[in-house]
Amino acid sequence: MPEHKHENPAADVVGLDIGGTKTHGVRWSAGVVAAEAKSGSANVQNVTAEEAARNLAELFTALGGQVGHVVAGSGGVDTDDDAGALRQLIAGQVPNARIDVVHDTRLILAAGAASTGIAVIAGTGSVAWGLDGGGRQARSGGWGYLLGDEGSGYWVGREAVRATLHRFNRAEPLGVLGESVLEATGAQKPEELIALFHRPSGRRYWAGQAHLVFKAAGAGDSGAQRIIDDGARYLCGLVADVASVLGAHSPVIIGGGLAVHQPKLQELIKAGLEKDGFTDVRFLSVDPVHGVDYLLRTGAL
């Protein structure tokens, strides 16, 4: 989904990783990182176009420099129209730059120094995408919170609320998970969670509560452990879907805040994938935005 504009070869390159919670930007000058900054999300599936534009303006101001080329990886670019809308938002900040827009899973694969394979994101949302040696692509998930995003941070946070309400309805003890959900949200009673959840606090807020589930599971809460088990199984299923189309099993590169920062989830995902024949499973050790450098160095754009 690229667009080629006039590009000053002496100008810098900016890479953007636009997630559901934040936008991470890096500016390269002559192939060397010159600046790095973060702002709020510029994904219009998560924020308004006005908020996305403000966050981009803040980011480009922080990055500075004369920008000749922008490579943006983002969720929610499912069609050419989606990519065009994001490109237009970015062009408002750097009107004379060449702007390439790719799905954020492509940055995951590139950040893992892989030109082919399967990329998985488990962050605010969830999705898997793959590319084989013949240039064929496949995808599973990434449909957004109303249609899917199983195994994502938002999904885990929502399941914590559901589990708490279910225990309450059955007149069961709330357990470590339920009590921690009430404490974290400020709810005095479980039934208050219903209205709280439907307020415009948004996906980012509930994705931010996912850590409660892992902490509760560590304390022996069986309901919390079931949520984590289910999430890992869903994420493994996304990989299997992509592999069934491409006929390829490796490497599998996994990124996203939830997957990268939760070792318990990592263990379950790796075990599940290895059981299904995926022998090369890697979790990102660098931020996805650095995949832009790999894409440019390998001539993939």
Image (tube, rainbow, N blue to C red):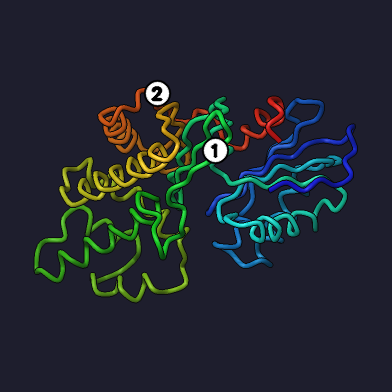
Amino acid type for the residue under numbered disc 1: Arg
Instruction: Provide residue 298's location: percent of width, then percent of height.
Output: 68, 25
Viewport quadrant of the C terminus: top right
Q: Which residue is mark 1?
A: 136
Residue shown at 41%/33% (left/top)? 247
Residue shown at 20%/48% (left/top)? 226
Image mark count: 2
How far apart are the alpha carbons under marks 2 and 1? 20 Å
Q: Which residue is mark 2?
A: 280
Q: Is residue 72 above or below residue 134?
A: below
Residue shown at 47%/58% (left/top)? 204
Task: Find out whether the residues at labels 2 and 1 contact each other: C-beta distance under 8 Å.
Answer: no
Instruction: Provide residue 27's location: percent of width, then percent of height.
Output: 74, 36
Residue shown at 27%/30% (left/top)? 271
Secondary structure of the residue carrying tag 2 is: loop
Q: Is residue 47 above or below residue 259?
A: below
Please identify, in this view, whether the residue under mark 2 or under mark 1 is nearer the observer. 1
Instruction: Provide residue 75's location: percent of width, then percent of height.
Output: 56, 52
Secondary structure of the residue carrying tag 1 is: loop
Q: Quadrant of residue 220?
A: top left
Amino acid type for the residue under numbered disc 2: Asp
Mark 1 crowdedness (10 Å alpha carbons): few <14, some 14-19, many ≥20: few
